[in-house]
Image (spheres, rainbow, N blue to C red):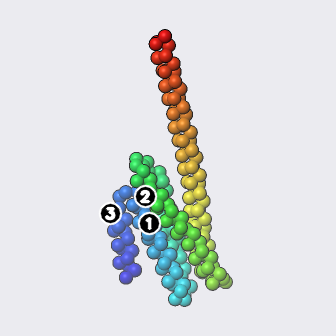
Amino acid sequence: FYFLDTFGENISRVLTIDPIAKANLEVSILEERLAEVTDLQANNADASQLSIALAELTQQQERTQERVREMEQEKLESQEREQERTEVNNRYEEHLQEQSDKLSEIEQEHRGNSEVEDSVNEAQKKQDEAEVEMEQEKNSSQESNSGTTENQEQEQHQEENKNDDNSDDRGREDD
């Protein structure tokens, strides 16, 4: 069944064109990979199975991070599209927290098993990179939004000054 599942995911990837939809798809697949790791852990799978699942989780984390990055670079024309992007980002952030908790749990359970520890460490490394990138994106987004607001305020102030000047000119013409 796993082969059919991943085959279906690959078909969906090919058919999905929109950057926001692509990022959303990858977040969904990432959530699925974490659920698979959770199931293996709950069923006391052996270390090699868990390591393989963690490697697949890490690979999916990289793919998702790339799609989220592409989505962030997309210029959006509508408030609705901005809302969609925000929702995908929020889901991704929630997933990162859940994944972090799960990795810590697995690390505790399999302390001393180098195969699992190596897989967990690699997954945590990619997790940390994703979190740093998300934080940087938030900061740059906030800075650009505040800059836009300041520019809008300056333009509005200049427009008001023009209107004041025009009304002064009209007042002088009446005299």
Q: Badge 3 local density, few (<14 within 10 Å), some, or many (20+)?
A: few
Residue at 59%, 54% in the rendered image:
136
Q: Badge 1 local density, few (<14 within 10 Å), some, or many (20+)?
A: many
* Element type at mark 3: helix
Q: Which residue does the numbered mark 2 point to in the structure image?
A: 84
Which tag, 1 or 3, sits closer to the chain's start? 3
Disc 3 marks a residue whose amino acid type is: Leu
Residue at the farthest top position: 175
Which of the pair 92/171 is nearer the observer?
171
Disc 2 marks a residue whose amino acid type is: Glu
Which tag, 2 or 1, sits closer to the chain's start? 1
Residue at 47%, 75% in the rendered image:
33
Residue 34 image offset from top left, x and y in percent: 50, 75
Q: Which residue does the numbered mark 1 point to in the structure image?
A: 26
Q: Which residue does the numbered mark 3 point to in the structure image?
A: 15
Residue 142 image offset from top left, x and y in percent: 57, 49
Which of the pair 93/173 is nearer the observer?
173
Q: CA distance from mark 2 to mark 1?
A: 15 Å
